[in-house]
């Protein structure tokens, strides 16, 4: 899973309807969707928006200020749960503070964009647009936008890319100045995946793990310097 998009707007702006329409469009393309939802009520209620999304998405993570849909009794963060999710793309409803993926704005009035954009907006959706972002009203176009321009960063804010936070790099990617490959927390000398999801780590942690593993392997018969491949199946 390396493509992602969030649908951001204020309450009653139509986020859930758009989420459902986009999930159904992607399913028609045989694309499995992992969904995440941020809301302000508990998840022990039937016939809620969360229930509707869960019935359509391949899998779902839900977040409130005090609960997580996976039934941990403490607050978790979306990047922690990605290895548990097996969709081809990630769709997020809400999550205004998430700075490691791009977003589409669903506005009630043009002025809302100043609060919701944060340099991460690819387009607007719905009845209200802006004078500086592409405006979409076709769910097929929105699906294409996700598949062509969606991305996600590890959210470590490690600074190894030269930017202070992932949100800064993400904004540069959205503006076309940078690319997802500029993130140095993935795909360097050490590549770790959990259930197919790349695990981000800052360069210091990468060096510690790499040198520790190579040091132990060097004591084994048959070891010689070169590319090392290790596969661990969790039980």
Image (spheres, grey):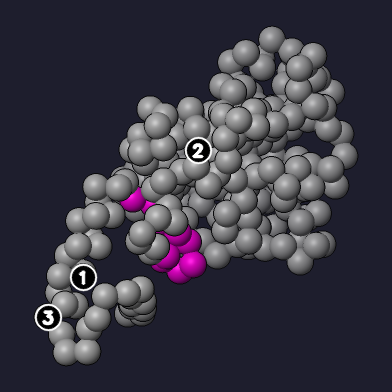
Is any atom of residue 59 visible in this view?
A: no
| Location of residue 17 with respect to 133 vertically, above or below | below
> On the rendered structure, is 138 left or right of 234?
right
Element class at badge 2: loop
Callouts 2 and 1 close, C-beta under 8 Å: no
Instruction: Sort mark 3 into few (<14), some (14-19) or many (20+) by Cα contacts within 10 Å.
Output: few
| Location of residue 56 with respect to 173 vertically, above or below | below
- Numbered badge on residue 214: 1
Callouts 2 and 3 close, C-beta under 8 Å: no
Give the residue displayed 84% in from the left and 43% down from the top: 141
CA gap between label 2 and label 3 equals 40 Å
Give the residue displayed 42% in from the left and 41% down from the top: 155
Q: How many marks?
A: 3
The stretch of residues the image draws in magenta is 193-201
Element class at badge 3: loop
User: Farthest top residue?
Assistant: 111
Q: Which residue is mark 2?
A: 100
Quadrant of the drawing holding the N terminus: bottom right
């Amino acid at each position: 899973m390396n493509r992602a998009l969030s649908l951001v707007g204020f309450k009653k702006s139509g986020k859930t309807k758009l989420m459902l329409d986009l999930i159904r469009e992607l399913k028609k393309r045989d694309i499995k969707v992992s969904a995440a939802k941020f809301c302000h009520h508990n998840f022990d209620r039937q016939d809620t928006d969360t229930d509707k999304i869960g019935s359509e998405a391949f899998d779902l993570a839900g977040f409130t200020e005090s609960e997580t849909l996976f039934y941990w009794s403490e607050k978790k963060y979306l990047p922690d749960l990605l290895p548990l999710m097996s969709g081809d793309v990630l769709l997020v409803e809400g999550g205004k503070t998430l700075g490691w993926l791009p977003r589409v704005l669903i506005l009630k009035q043009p002025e809302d964009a100043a609060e919701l954009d944060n340099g991460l907006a690819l387009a607007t959706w719905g009845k209200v647009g802006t004078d500086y972002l592409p405006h979409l009203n076709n769910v097929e176009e929105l699906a294409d936008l996700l598949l062509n321009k969606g991305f996600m960063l590890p959210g470590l804010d490690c600074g190894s890319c030269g930017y202070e936070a992932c949100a800064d790099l993400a904004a540069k990617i959205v503006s076309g100045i940078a690319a997802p490959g500029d993130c140095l927390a993935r795909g360097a000398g050490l590549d770790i995946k959990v259930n197919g999801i790349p695990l981000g780590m800052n360069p210091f942690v990468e060096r510690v793990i790499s040198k520790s593993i190579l040091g132990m392997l060097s004591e084994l018969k048959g070891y010689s310097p070169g590319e090392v491949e290790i596969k661990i199946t969790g039980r």
